[in-house]
Image (cartoon, rainbow, N blue to C red):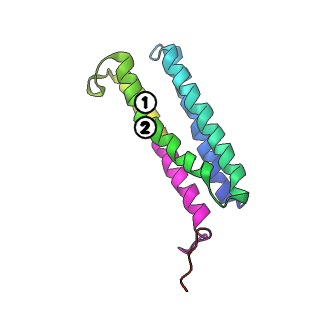
């Protein structure tokens, strides 16, 4: 595996750790409750495990199951975070106080960045570098 391809996986894992780090910072400032901190911990653990699994799967992947989990994980975070905050606070997202909205925005931006990296990982697994020719899943016409 080339260093550039490994960097995508390592950045994905690093972004996963930023979920919890940002939640700890906001928890120490008093903006996040313990439930929000645990949500950040769960997101961190899951995305780090998926990132490590994708890195290990890359060498022998004929069916990239963990790579697709790398795409689904951030999508779930994007959908669940506003729902969780709305249920916990009892108000719609539009009425969030500024500090709560900032936390949600950071969480969502991290998930979007991870989603983009996951798409690049899957694309790098399917296509040969620099071309649109398929590496796997190729169907030849006869």
Q: Nearer the viewer, residue 37 or 58?
A: 58
Q: Is residue 83 left or right of residue 25?
A: left
**x and y percentages locating residue 114 in the rendered image:** 52, 45
- Density class for disc 1 (Cα within 10 Å; few <14, some 14-19, many ≥20) is some
Q: Is residue 114 left or right of residue 108?
A: right
Q: Which residues make up the magenta segment?
A: 112-136
Label 1 with label 2: CB-CB less than 8 Å: yes
Identify the residue under disc 2: 78
Name which quarter of the figure residue 126 lies in: bottom right
Identify the residue under disc 1: 81
**x and y percentages locating residue 27 in the rendered image:** 51, 17
Is the N terminus in the top left, top right, bottom left or bottom right quadrant? bottom right
* Magenta-drawn stretch contains 119: yes
* Residue 17 visible (yes or no): no
- Density class for disc 2 (Cα within 10 Å; few <14, some 14-19, many ≥20) is some
Mark pair 1, 2: CA separation? 6 Å
């Amino acid at each position: 595996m080339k260093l550039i391809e490994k960097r995508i996986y390592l950045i994905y894992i690093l972004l996963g750790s930023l979920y919890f780090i940002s939640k700890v910072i906001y928890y120490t400032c008093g903006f996040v409750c313990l439930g929000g901190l645990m949500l950040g911990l769960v997101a961190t653990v899951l995305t780090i495990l998926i990132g490590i699994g994708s890195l290990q799967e890359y060498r022998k992947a004929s069916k990239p199951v963990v790579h697709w989990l790398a795409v689904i994980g951030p999508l779930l975070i994007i959908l669940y975070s506003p729902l969780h905050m709305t249920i916990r606070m009892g108000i719609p997202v539009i009425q969030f106080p500024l500090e709560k909205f900032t936390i949600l925005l950071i969480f969502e931006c991290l998930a979007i960045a991870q989603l983009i990296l996951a798409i690049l990982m899957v694309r790098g697994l399917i296509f040969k570098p620099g071309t649109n020719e398929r590496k796997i899943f190729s169907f030849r016409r006869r």
